[in-house]
Amino acid sequence: MIPLYLANWTLLSVARFRSRAGLAVWFAGLREGMRGGHGSRRPMSWRTVLRLTRGGRPPIV
């Protein structure tokens, strides 16, 4: 689910930007986040996915 979510979020974000400078800053942040150093990650449980979906914010847009 992680690659699908990340690809979808990237496509939506790129489509929303109007300036190249803003897009460059966004990609710099994405690279920094992908590099690591943010602690351990726990996978999202299916219960959380259901709660987000019921609340109108599904994890996959």
Image: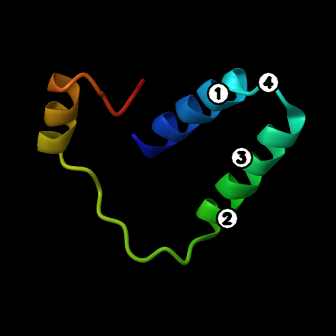
The residue type indicated by label 1 comes to Leu
Q: Which residue is mark 4?
A: 18
Q: Which residue is mark 1?
A: 11
Name which quarter of the figure residue 29 lies in.
Answer: bottom right
Distance in Å between CA atoms under marks 1 and 3: 12 Å
Q: Which residue is mark 2?
A: 32
Distance in Å between CA atoms under marks 2 and 4: 22 Å
The residue type indicated by label 2 comes to Glu
Q: Secondary structure at mark 3?
A: helix
Q: Residue furthest right?
A: 20
Q: Nearer the viewer, residue 47 or 24?
A: 24
Residue 13 in picture, x, y percent from top left: 64, 31
Question: Comparing marks 2 and 4, which lies closer to the viewer?
Answer: 4
**Image position of 10 (left or right of 53):** right
Distance in Å between CA atoms under marks 3 and 4: 12 Å
Point out the image quarter for the C terminus. Answer: top left
Q: Which residue is mark 3?
A: 26
